[in-house]
Amino acid sequence: MNEADRKKNEKIKKMSGSFNILSNDSTDGHGGYGVGTINLNNVTPVFVDPEENTAFIDMGALHARSDVEKRIKFLKDRQEVPNGKLYWLVWVTVEHLDGKPAYTGVGACEMIVDRSIRRGYKSMPEHVNNMDKSMKGKIAVDHMDDRSKGVLRRFLKDFNQEYWDASTDELKNHLHTDDE
């Protein structure tokens, strides 16, 4: 068995051992299976519910299968969900800064859900773009209302104060509100 066949067999064994959503860097130049995939290991979906003044993590959102999204048909027109409840799905990225884990990127996406009619609104391009921004260490929360930003800030601080302390001033400033 030549070296290329051996590596191929090792890769197949690794892939069949366990399911892992888009992990490892598959852009090593071979141009085959997996090129262009991304690593979501450091991204966590956080839902902000400004009406209830709460935030929570739901990993199902990585596949659009969170509890908020289950049994809801999402429409492209916000006007078709006039009585919906506002949620913010915030993609939070954690990486090391100066040797310490920190919140490095956040990208907020509006989501409106009306359980009574089992319909909702979300913009898939917004979700993809803001997840990408978060993964690249950018902050995309300026379109959030102050109440929602405050809920997110408190959640991130309470979830792990050390991560918050190690985060950039830029992130902290973007989540700063007047009622602080």
Image (cartoon, rainbow, N blue to C red):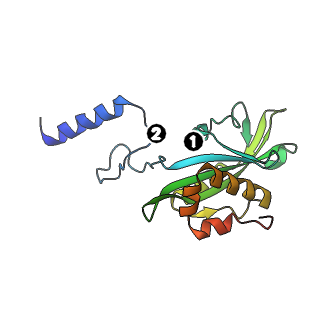
Quadrant position of the C terminus in the picture: bottom right
The image shows residue 147, relative to residue 121, as above or below, that is below
Task: Assess whether mark 2 and mark 1 are in contact (beta carbons under 8 angstroms).
Answer: yes
Q: CA distance from mark 1 to mark 2?
A: 9 Å
Foreground pick, 163 / 141 = 163
Say which element carries label 2. Answer: loop
* Tag 1: amino acid: Leu
Q: Which residue is mark 2?
A: 21
Say which element carries label 1. Answer: helix
Residue 148, image quadrant: bottom right
Earlier in the chain: of badge 1 and badge 2, it is: 2
Foreground pick, 63 / 44 = 44
Quadrant position of the N terminus in the picture: top left
Q: Which residue is mark 1?
A: 62
The image position of residue 86, as x and y in percent, is 79, 47
Foreground pick, 140 / 157 = 157
